[in-house]
Image (spheres, grey):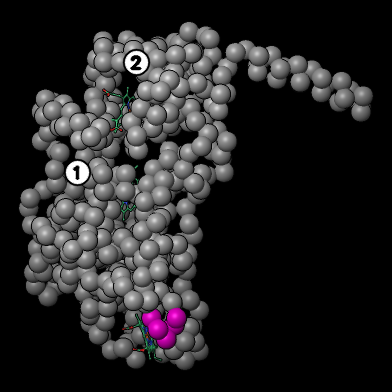
């Protein structure tokens, strides 16, 4: 029994190692320009705008509609008005700036109410189940970004 | 500068979409509650708040609720919170504890408590601590009745708080923030402005910077507590002040302080002071 278990460990390590080497930038390793932009993709994998649209609307993920109106999602009821409308947002910002706003909104908008979706140092007293976790995964950020780029 | 520019921009964009512009503010209607002893005028809007207020004007949460919800509060006959007040009135008259006495035996009618809710929480020299209405009731139960304290935030205590608060309905909130209460008030203020949780927000981000705007389907109020305990349509019961604080903290994925904790007492004093001048409105109706 024992040897069997031991044999499993190296296999598990190998899986983890492959995941880490897949080019995902860890939250603390993200490089920001002085104006808050992030030019390097967080995953190297092109974002999927269709999934990004879902993440955008999902109440437990992006929940962007809590604060932003977005006509492209008019089938969803109740769009918030805390932040600016996101119609045509890809005409106002380039990809790197939008990525920066998603990763850490505060680097672009000082003191913003907007959550930082790919950052570990959030507010005090974070609930246990969310500790050490980002709101969105790296790929989800890239997906939402790809979706935002379609809002022209 | 950035803030000013952004809000000007938001204003422009909101005005451009008519559907939203119409709802951007609270109601201008005034609230007169049709109660058992006649109409009671409620101050839901203070144009000139006391000096040092962080808010340019004060608004009761009632102002931001829907027409239907507002109407429920305007008549005690329609207010579902009054059922719990009636239950508390029965409790008031029922003997309990080793002394075999009821609240009524010592305090007479609930109306003997008039004015109390408007000045709580307050520092109590004899107790050597900041006392909420919940604290006084439980203290009296233990000290004078020889009865067990009720659970803080539980149904029995919250209903009794509503009955006693009702006696002050219409009176302006007037809590003291100086003297020995100052330390707790400062702590409450610090908690109010500290960003918490994975979503990284402070109470002020929503209730000071953005009241009057919609956050998804919720019309944001100033997060005042003059209406508490509040009957919420969402859970069909009376909600204590601390339960509401807890809910807001959980929504931003922060670990709430304990209901009945010193931190929430301090926060209660601080939030109450932000509403000095609004009428006691309990039991209010909210969604």
Q: Which corner quadrant holds the N terminus of chain B?
A: top left
Which quadrant of the structure image shows residue A55? top left
Q: Which residue is mark 2?
A: A148
- The answer to whether any part of residue B253 appears in the image is no
Residue A62 appears left or right of A42: left
Image point 52% across, 44% down: which residue?
A127
Relative vertical location of residue A75 with respect to residue B101 in this rendering, above or below: above
Which quadrant of the structure image shows residue A21? top right
Which quadrant of the structure image shows residue A47? top left
Relative vertical location of residue B260 with respect to residue A113 in this rendering, above or below: below
Q: Which residues are magenta?
A: B124-128
Q: Nearer the viewer, residue B229 or B221?
A: B221
Instruction: List x then y, in percent, for residue B123.
Output: 37, 77
Which mark is drawn over residue B212?
1
Q: Chain of mark 2?
A: A
Q: Mark 2: which secondary structure?
A: helix
Relative vertical location of residue A22 with respect to residue B173 in this rendering, above or below: above
| Cα separation between marks 1 and 2 | 27 Å
Q: Mark 1: which secondary structure?
A: loop
> Magenta part mainly helix, strand or loop?
loop
Q: Nearer the viewer, residue B104 or B45?
A: B45
Image point 23% across, 24% down: which residue?
A85
């Amino acid at each position: 029994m024992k040897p069997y278990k031991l044999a499993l460990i190296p296999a598990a390590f190998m899986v983890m190692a492959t995941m880490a080497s897949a080019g995902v930038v860890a939250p603390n390793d993200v490089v920001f320009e002085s104006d808050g932009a992030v030019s390097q993709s967080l995953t190297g994998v092109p974002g999927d705008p269709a999934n990004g649209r879902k993440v955008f609307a999902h109440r437990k993920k992006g929940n962007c509609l809590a604060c932003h109106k977005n006509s492209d999602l008019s089938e969803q009821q109740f769009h918030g008005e805390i932040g600016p409308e996101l119609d045509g947002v890809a005409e106002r910002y380039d990809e790197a700036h939008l990525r920066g706003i998603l990763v850490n909104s505060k680097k672009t908008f000082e003191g913003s109410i907007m959550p930082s979706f790919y950052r570990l140092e959030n507010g005090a007293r974070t609930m246990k189940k969310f500790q050490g976790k980002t709101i969105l995964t790296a790929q989800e950020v890239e997906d939402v970004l790809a979706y935002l780029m379609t809002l022209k | 500068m950035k803030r000013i520019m952004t809000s000007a921009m938001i204003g422009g964009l909101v005005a451009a979409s008519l559907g939203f512009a119409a709802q951007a503010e609270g109601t201008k209607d005034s609230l007169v509650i049709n109660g058992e002893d006649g109409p009671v005028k409620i101050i839901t809007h203070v144009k000139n708040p006391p000096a040092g207020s962080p808010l340019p004007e004060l608004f009761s949460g009632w102002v931001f609720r829907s027409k239907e919800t507002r109407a429920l509060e305007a008549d005690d006959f329609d207010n579902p919170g009054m059922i719990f007040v009636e239950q508390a009135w029965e409790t008031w008259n029922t003997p309990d504890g080793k002394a075999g006495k009821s609240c009524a035996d010592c305090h007479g009618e609930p109306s003997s408590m008039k004015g109390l809710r408007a000045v709580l929480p307050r520092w109590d020299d004899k107790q050597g601590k900041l006392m909420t209405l919940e604290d006084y009731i439980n203290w009296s139960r233990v000290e004078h009745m020889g009865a067990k304290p009720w659970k803080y935030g539980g149904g029995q205590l919250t209903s009794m708080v509503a009955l006693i608060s009702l006696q002050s309905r219409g009176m302006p909130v007037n809590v003291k923030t100086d003297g020995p209460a100052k330390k707790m008030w400062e702590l409450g203020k610090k908690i109010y402005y500290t960003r918490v949780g994975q979503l990284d927000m402070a109470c002020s981000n929503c209730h000071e910077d953005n009241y009057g705007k919609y956050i998804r389907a919720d019309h944001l109020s100033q997060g005042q507590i003059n209406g508490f305990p509040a009957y919420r349509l969402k859970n069909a019961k009376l909600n204590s002040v601390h339960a509401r604080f807890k809910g807001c903290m959980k929504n931003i994925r922060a670990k709430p302080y304990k209901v009945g904790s010193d931190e929430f007492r301090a926060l209660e004093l601080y939030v109450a002071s932000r509403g000095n001048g609004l009428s006691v409105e309990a039991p209010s109706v909210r969604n």
